[in-house]
Image: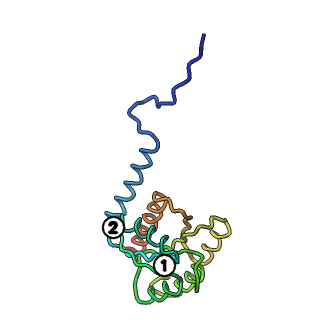
Amino acid sequence: MPMTPRSTAPDDASSPPAADTQSTQQRSVEHQIQTRHRGARVLIVEDDDFGQEIIAEYVRAVGLAVELAGDGVEALHKAQGSQYDLILMDIQMPRMDGLEATRHLRQLPAHSATPIIAVTAHAYVIAEEMSTQAGMNAFLTKPLDPGTLYATLLKWLDSRKLIEMQT
């Protein structure tokens, strides 16, 4: 008797494929950012112009306000005169890298608790440990996955809002 291959289709034809579920979850996260944090100010610190534009496009797509800095020196200058709700910080940059910039930012009263997210192409454990020691709150690797970026933005913007409500 010949054997027929087993179907890989789900038993319940109404259950969506995993990719559809993931897409739905990402849309939900995007909607939550737009609803709860529209207009929140995000400083993107990235020395590569193309990288800046890609990250900025993702961030603007969910209704957040974007300001750009090309290195740590520029980021510190901007942060001294502005309040940001979240900072996305490249680690390796000219003049002042993201680790040193974060250490300086943590000394500014206005940014001692601002979520700072490392964004780097170096997915080494040591890079993640160094970013945490410098005072960064989370670690993302390039190329950025939009779903991971949005989940991280939501988590840390929610955290920031909670801290502000308690003070």
**What kind of element bears circle 2?**
loop
Determine the residue located farthest toward the right in the rendered image. Answer: 126
Q: Within 10 angstroms of label 1, few (less than 14), some, or many (20 or more) residues?
A: some
Query: Which percent across, then down, holds residue 46?
Result: 51, 76
**Which quadrant of the figure contains the N terminus?**
top right
Q: According to the image, label 1 marks what residue?
A: 113
Q: Is residue 114 left or right of residue 125?
A: left
Q: CA distance from mark 1 to mark 2?
A: 22 Å
Instruction: Return the residue nearer the eye: 49 or 122.
Output: 49
Q: Which residue sits at x=47%, y=77%?
A: 114
Instruction: Return the residue nearer the eye: 49 or 135.
Output: 49
Image marks 1 and 2: residues in contact by CB distance under 8 Å = no
Q: If you read the primary sequence from the N terminus, does the residue marked by circle 1 or circle 2 appear first?
A: 2
Amino acid found under the numbered disc labelled 2: Gly
Q: Within 10 angstroms of label 2, few (less than 14), some, or many (20 or more) residues?
A: some
Query: Which percent across, then down, holds residue 71?
Result: 52, 82
Q: Which residue sits at x=42%, y=30%?
A: 12
Q: Which residue sits at x=50%, y=82%?
A: 112
- Residue 63 is marked as 2
Where residue 162 sits, quadrant-wise, is bottom left
Amino acid found under the numbered disc labelled 1: Ala
Instruction: Return the residue nearer the eye: 146 or 112.
Output: 146
